[in-house]
Amino acid sequence: MCLLVKELRDKLENGILSRIYNARLNSSAYNRVPNTTNIGFEYIEGELILLNLDDLGICASSGSACTSGSLDPSHVLKAMGVPFTALHGSIRFSLSRYTTEDEINYTIEKMPEVVNKLTALSPFQKELKELRERKGIV
């Protein structure tokens, strides 16, 4: 069962990271649990991402259960060296044996729409432009 969940997690990560230029994986790609991923979206607010995902029926969180209700960035992500530009835009997806491939595909389909909408509203347009240029995106 763990292998299937890991495969779905990897599909979710690859789908998001390949479609969203300001997304970054906030962990090692190898040494971690198979059911959870934490992805940072630079220069946008995680709480806004969550509100939009909720409207689409997608469940995610911006932190651990231990820190629910807090708007402070994760002390764990800080300790891991996640850049400030991605700390407040970090989202955690938790999968289980009940997660379906259709749910993963739906999330992969909707995430770029959500992130692009919020990126367009971000006050950090200069920094986003520089990030696109560094990644070779025009």
Image (cartoon, rainbow, N blue to C red):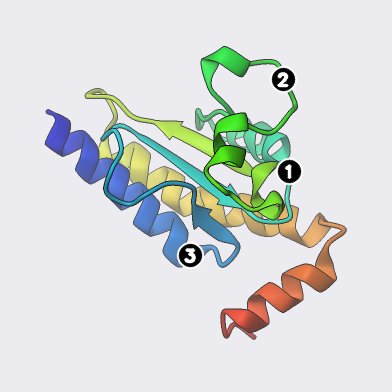
Kindly indicate the quadrant of the structure image that contains residue 23.
bottom right
Residue at x 60% of width, y 62% of height: 22
**Res. 70 mark:** 2
Residue 112, placed above or below residue 126: above
Nearer to us of marks 1 and 3 is 1
On the image, numbered disc 3 is attached to which residue? 19
Q: Quadrant of the N terminus?
A: top left
What residue is at 66 percent from the left and 56 percent from the top?
A: 42
Q: Amino acid at mark 1?
A: Glu
The answer for how far apart the CA atoms under marks 2 and 1 are is 14 Å
Quadrant position of residue 55: top right
- What amino acid is at disc 2? Ser
**Which residue is identified by label 1?**
45
Quarter of the picture holding the C terminus: bottom right
The picture quadrant where one finds residue 85 is bottom right
Tag in front: 2 or 1: 2
